[in-house]
Image (cartoon, rainbow, N blue to C red):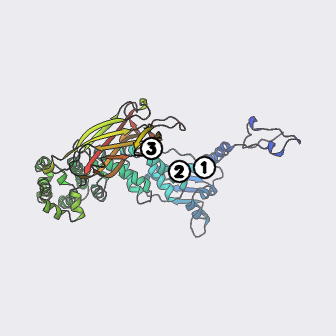
Amino acid sequence: MERKSDLGEPSLKNRRKCSPQMPENSCQIMVDNSQTVLNILRNLYVERQMCDVALRVGNREHYAHRLILCAFSDVFQAMLMKPEWCEWHESKVELQELLPECEKVFHLFLEYFYTGKILITHTNVMPILALADKYIVKGLSRLCVDYMCKHVPHAASHNQLFLWLQYSIPCGHNEVGEKCQNYIKWNLESIANTPDFSNIDAEMLIQLLQENDVIVYNEMVLYNCVVRWLDLQKIKLHSSEMSANEVENYMRELVKNIMIYIRFPMMTPRELADLLLSPLIKQYKEFFVDRMAIGMIYHSGQLEQIEKISQTQEGRLLFSPRLYTSDTYSAVLLIENFNSLPSYHTSTFVFSSHMSAADCESDKINDWVVDLYPKGVWFKKCYLIVWQGTLEVPEEIISTVRLSLTCRELLQAKIKVKVAVLIYGIQGGVEHVMEVREKIHHFTNDDKVMNIDNLIPFCELNPCASTNSHDSPYLIGPNRNQLKLNIVITSLT
C-alpha cells in the first residue's frame, strides 16, 4: 500500500509524464504546496504540538517553538540561543510588556510567526507595532507603519491620533509622526472638538502654535481652540492630588507659556475688543493686555514699534499670518461632476483677497483669476509671426494637474506673496485636508502669472489606462465626484 505524504499531493494539472525521448527540461514542473505547509505550521502552534518553550505574558502562557521564534526575531534569537542570557536554557520565559494593550494582542503577534497573517485595526496597530519594535520583527513593523500612514484620519476620529504621535516620534517612525503632525496642523478645528485633543502635551502645542502653516478659519478660532485645551487641562489637574492653590499657580504659568504664541495682531480690532469680556482675559488681565496692545499697534500702523517688536523671532511671528480660510484671504475652488469632465478641461475662478491684516491697510485688495487644469494641458499647434518669418509651434500635451494664478491689477510695481493650495480628500471615510502645496512668487507688471504643475499626482486624480479604475482619494462628496481645493494668498511684502 502506497503511503501518502502529510504535505498532500500536487493537483493533477501539475503532473507531467516524462519519456526517455523527451528533453530533460520538458519534465520539470513547479509544485506550489506552500499553503499546506503553512497550515501544518499553524497547527503546531494552535494544537501545541512539540512546543519546547512557554512564554508567560501577564497572566497567560503562550506555547511556542524556539526554532520559529529565533527565525523571526533577532531578540528571541539572542535570548534563546546565547548562553549569556539567563533565558537560553529555560523552558518557561517570563516577558515584561510595558503596555497592557501589548499583553492583549501578544497571541496575534505570536501567531503571525507561524502564518504570516495578522488582523490589524486602528485600535490594535499601536501595541502590535510596539511588540514588533521590541522583538525586532522588521517585516511586521513595516506593515504596521504602512497601515498607520494610510489611516491617520481614522485614528483621529477614534481618539488614537495623539497616542500614535507620542509613540512614533521617539521610536524613530518619522513617517508616521510627520503624517500625524500634518493632520493636526491642517485639520486643527476638527481635532479640537474631539476628546483626544486633551492628550496633546504643552510642548507639542507650543511647537504647533509656532508654525505658519496651521490651517484655521482665523486667529480667533485658534485662540478658542487653545482656551478649550486649557479648560481640559484644568479638569485633569482638579482630578489629581494637587491642591487648589497648586492648580492655580500651574495654570497661570501654563496660560503664559501657551498664549504667548497666539498672534493677536492677526485679529481684527473688533475681535480684540470682544476678547476683553472673556473670562480668561479677565483672570489674567495683566498678561493679556500687553499682548493685545501689540495688536492695536499693528492695526494703527506704528511702524517703529512694529520694527522694534520684530527684532526677535518670537516678535516676527506675531505679524505673520497663518493659513486662514476666511474669505479675507482665501477662496474655495470646487469642481462638480469631475468624472464626466472632458480631457484638458479648464475651470476658471475669480476672487479677491486682502493683502494685509492691518486695519490701517484694509483698502489693499487684489483681484485674482485662477485657471485650473485637472485633466491635463493641451497646447494646440499654432504659428508665430517673427521678423524672420512664420514659425510653426507643434502641439504639446502635458499630463499634469496645473493651477495658473493671474494677478489682474498690481497695487504696486512689485508684490511678493505666498500662495498655498489646500487639497482636500477622503481617507477612511473622513474628509480632510490631505496635502498643502505652497509657493512664494513675485508678481510684477511683466510677470502677472504663476503656474503650479503636478499640483496633484495626475494618475491619482485621473486613473491612467495602465492602472485599474479606482476612486481617487482626492475626490470627495456623496458620490466621490467633487474636486475641492482652497487657495490662500498672503502678502510677504
The residue that label 3 is drawn on is 457
Q: Is residue 370 left or right of residue 114?
A: left
- Give the amino acid at mark 3: Pro
Q: Can you give x and y, in whole percent of width and height, for residue 406 in the image?
A: 30, 43
Q: Residues within 10 Å of mark 2 (few under 14, many from 20)?
A: many
Q: Nearer the viewer, mark 3 or mark 1?
A: 3
Q: Is residue 24 left or right of residue 419?
A: right
The residue that label 1 is drawn on is 114
Whether residue 13 is visible here, answered yes or no, is yes
Question: Where on the picture, by quarter, is residue 461?
Answer: top left
Tell me which numbered mark, 3 or 1, is placed earlier along the sequence: 1
The answer to whether mark 3 and mark 1 are in CB contact below 8 A is no
Question: Where on the picture, by quarter, is residue 342?
Answer: top left
Q: Residues within 10 Å of mark 3 (few under 14, many from 20)?
A: few
Q: Can you give x and y, in whole percent of width and height, for residue 417 in the image?
A: 27, 51
Question: Where on the picture, by quarter, is residue 175?
Answer: bottom left
The residue that label 2 is drawn on is 109
Position of 263 relative to 367 (above/below): below
Q: Nearer the viewer, residue 5 or 104?
A: 5
Q: Can you give x and y, in whole percent of width and height, for residue 204 in the image?
A: 31, 57
Residue drawn at 42 percent across, 35 percent down = 344
Give the SS element for disc 2. helix
- Give the amino acid at mark 1: Tyr
Give the SS element for disc 3. loop
Q: Is residue 401 left or right of residue 292?
A: right
Whether residue 58 is visible here, answered yes or no, is no
> Which of the image's four quarters has the C terminus?
bottom left
